[in-house]
Image (cartoon, grey):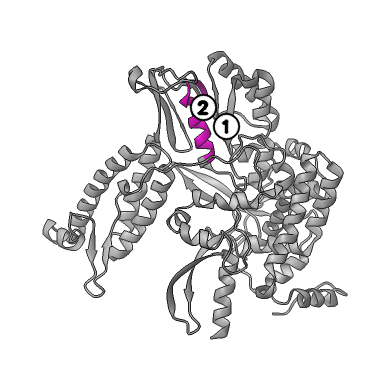
Amino acid sequence: MALKTRKGNFNRLKLFIIIMKIWKDINWTKVNLMVFDLQRKIFKASVNKSIGKVRYYQKTLVNSHEAKLIAVRKVTQDNRGKKIPGVDGKLVLNHLERIKLAYDLRLDGSADPIRRVFIPKGNTKRPLGIPTIKDRAKQALVKLALEPEWEAKFDPNSFGFRPGYSQADAKWIVTRQIQGAPKYFLDADIKSCFDNISHDYLLKKLNTTKMFENQIKSWLKAGVTDFTFSNGTEISENRAGTPQGGVLSPLLANIVLNGMEQLLKDKFNRNVRLIRYADDFVVFSKREKIIVESKKLLQDFLKPIGLDFSNEKTRIGHTLIGPNPGLDFLGFNFRNHKVSVHHGVKNTKGIKQNFKQITEPSRKSIKTHKEEIVALLRIYKNAPLSSVIEALSSKIRGWTYYYSLSQSTKTFTVLDGWLWKRLWRWSVKRFKGAKRAKKRCFSVSGWKFGFIDEITKKKWVLKRYDQVKVRKYVKIKKGASIFDGQLEYFSKRLALHHPLFKRLRGTLVKQNRRCAYCEVLFSPDDIIELHHVRDKNGRWLKEFQFVHGHCHDKIHGEKKSNR
């Protein structure tokens, strides 16, 4: 491919390619260590409130070739999710294109229009703003510099879109809040948070250098188009909000909402507790008056941002008393139940009380899950049974692992009964009769949904919900951050976040929680994949290894080139 370079810069570009060789030969270990070292320095300077050092290290970071390479890798390789191109139509880049993109990457204050696409959310559709591949890389570069600065400033009970923090941490602390005593709560939802954030307020709160400010401003003000690749459409002005779909948008939303917890602490001291995950949050207090006042304070906090509460989804209630006790948060239902003193929990003095706390999957999350199962069966109505079982297993495994953090045994048992009836009706309809359905789909002993492959004699059996056991979870340490050098601590927590690690924990421990290829410690924001090992002759071995996503690509790329 012919490279279009600026006049007089060809030798520089050639030198850059020679230094970095080709993409697959880049020493990512050295690149990662260099970038992480600068991020650690930014974090430390931010903790010490040394603004001058923060700005110096940030400038050094965004101008380094190493940071540019990581930014490009994150948006072209590490993005394993749904890939939607921007208005440029580009998504997959070859090695040389990645090298050129990294070379050309600079914060010049320019931005391309974003492409608007809609994804379903409940009964409505949520708009996403998809930047071009170049703008995604630039956003990833800015995020590398800004994230460590703000990780040192974020409220301690903010858990959304932060490296090493998860929904499980937020769920744990909500449970702890109502274990000791029933409380009043404010269950709040911000109306169209990402779409209504004031640009002026955001830029003022960022309080960053002109280089970052101009670049972020250009992204915020970039036009929006319902672009199709056959013909472009009119570009509309974006006057407010941070478009969902951008690499930087979650971080900017977190920055804007930061300070709510501290606001309530300054006013009510320890009599109130706010737990936030992204734009969803809940406030707890033993006194209803404090909850009412907190709502007013938070509304005043959100007003200059251009935000307000959703009246339909925001309510004040109690975890034990009232017409509708308990609250739904992050897909769980949190509630205190009245019981006899003999079955109650003990207070701090060791005296049993007449209530207990129960956390279980919410009715809404159960309903949504059932709808997804029904839709899946409709899609796979004529597919091979092995494909049906694989698809159902994947859906059930992910759902049950998430909700196994709660007292979900009863829910899992009920879902087993519901799913069996659903699968029986599906089988009878597909194979036109009960006898054929039993022979084809329930031929495994015990009336389990499955079959025995006639050729391979392999048993295909769908696992039950209640085969997943309730698991314990340890909340992240207060104030812990990946940028303060606690890589060992965060690598030890990996098994808490993914069922794959839990199932193959022995393999992870055997590797000392390091990538089997590059031998770098795994971190929370890494893309980690399972590699099936082959011998020198290319034959599969009964051995698996955990590797980084980009290392996995490199392994298979090397094997392809060797054949």
Residue at position x 71%, y 29% in the image: 304
SS of the residue under disc 1? strand
Magenta stretch contains residue 366: no
Between label 2 and label 1, give the one nearer the viewer.
Answer: 2
**Left or right of residue 322, residue 84 in this image:** right
Residue 86 versus residue 478: which sits nearer the camera?
A: 478
Q: Residues within 10 Å of mark 2 (few under 14, many from 20)?
A: some
Q: Which mark is residue 177?
A: 2
Mark nearer the N terminus (2 vs 1): 2
Quadrant where the N terminus sits is: bottom right
Residue designated by label 1: 275
Q: Can the viewer see residue 89 in this picture? A: no
Q: Residue furthest front?
A: 350
Where does the magenta region start and end? Answer: 169-187
Vertical order, 152 against 443 (above or below) = above
Disc 2 from disc 1: Cα separation: 10 Å
Disc 1 marks which amino acid?
A: Ile
Disc 2 marks which amino acid?
A: Gln
- Return the x and y of residue 148 as percentages of the image width and height: 72, 47
SS of the residue under disc 2? helix
Quarter of the image where one finds residue 551: bottom right
